[in-house]
Amino acid sequence: MNFLVVSDREYKKTSRGIDLITTLLSEKGYYVDHLVFFRRKKFQEKQIADNVRQLYLYDSIKLYRGKLQFFFPGFLLLIYFQYIIKKSGINFEKYDYVVLESGHPTYFVSAIKNKIIYRQSDPTHICFNSNRNFYRKLEADVIKKSLFVSSALNEKFFHPEYINKSFHWHSGFIPIHRLKNEVNKKLIIILGGELNWHLLSKMAKKYQEYQFNVIGISRIKPLQKNIIIKGYLDYDSYQKLLLSASIAIIPFSKNYTRQLRQVSYTAKILVSMQLGIPILLKAYGDIQNSKNEKKLFVYKTHKEALLLLENIILKTSNGEINREVSQETQDFLLPQTAENRLKELDELFTKWLK
């Protein structure tokens, strides 16, 4: 079978749901075209494996992910991107299935007559900063046309009209091989999406002898000298930084935690647990109470966050918190490894792709 997978990032063997889907299809011997939708610069297609090819669509006006898109209503952006898709000359008929990731790949819905598989990674209001009502309707069209929907969202948030073809599948995490004696006691990593920069600034100001490395953000100006913006890292650099960190902080903004009520533990939380890193986390969804056996410290207010960070630093310094991972935590993590999630995904695909 031939598959077209449409994502907004290049395919790499990561714990992202869409990447695990591509990995599964590749390992089963199917032919996969993995299309990045869109890139601001031109890239040549490349062969990643014998049966996996990386393709790109180029946005010449650079509306995609640019500030210009905030000045256009959703329907005009849809017309523009549909023009780009049509101009690309992609032959959708040669694919048995098209896998669309949530977010901008939903623009493809009107161009596809093939069977659609939808990977709903994030809620629409996280994927888009503007025109959210328009994109909710666009996503509803995708779900309506889909053979089935693999969703990272909790079942209680499924659209009632399409619940019979939706199933919950969390992508899990890729374990990192733990090494000894590489921890930098003064290194703190900041993980997550939309951050509370005011709280982070307070922390950095209070603990100026610590270095706060922010992963995943590349455009915002740091507020303190000891806040280092690392941007989006390749997997090797990301792994090295996690292995070196003494503490992980996930200081989601208040607005972002309201949006995250639909999801559960992220891969960043799970891999930090696997490495035995104490995690300071803003409460969201079902993650409300501290679970110290997992070294997970959950706060609701700025005051709680600062007190918990002080407590973590003190206990880490005197050896009360170390990098050992309890058996309870190991038992919790095992089913959530990417390897086991791939087995689960394989069973689901076997069921639906008959």
Image (tube, rainbow, N blue to C red):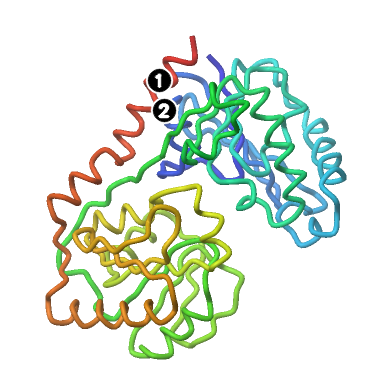
Q: State the SS at label 2.
A: helix
Q: How many marks?
A: 2
Image x and y of residue 34, in percent = 57, 33
> Toward which corner of the image does residue 246 lie, by quadrant?
bottom left
Left or right of 157 on screen, residue 79: right
Q: Nearer the viewer, residue 156 or 98?
A: 156
Image x and y of residue 26, in percent = 44, 26
In the displayed structure, 130 sits above or below 81; it is below
Q: Residues within 10 Å of mark 2 (few under 14, many from 20)?
A: some
Residue type (three-letter) at the residue carrying disc 2: Leu
In the displayed structure, 87 sits above or below 126; it is above
Residue at (34%, 84%) from the top-left corner? 210
Left or right of 330 on screen, residue 130: right
Residue at (29%, 83%) from the top-left corner? 310
Check disc 1 and report the residue beneath it.
28
Image x and y of residue 177, in percent = 22, 52
Residue type (three-letter) at the residue carrying disc 1: Lys
Give the numbered dot on residue 290.
none
Q: State the SS at label 1.
A: loop
> Toward which corner of the image does residue 255 lie, by quadrant?
bottom right
Q: CA distance from mark 2 to mark 1?
A: 6 Å
Check disc 2 and report the residue beneath it.
24
Disc 2 + disc 1, Cβ < 8 Å: yes
Image x and y of residue 128, in percent = 67, 52
Q: Nearer the viewer, residue 145 or 308?
A: 308
Q: Nearer the viewer, residue 292 or 90?
A: 292
In the displayed structure, 307 sits above or below 149; it is below
Residue at (22%, 64%) from the top-left corner? 292
Residue at (55%, 64%) from the top-left corner? 194
In the displayed structure, 328 sits above or below 142; it is below
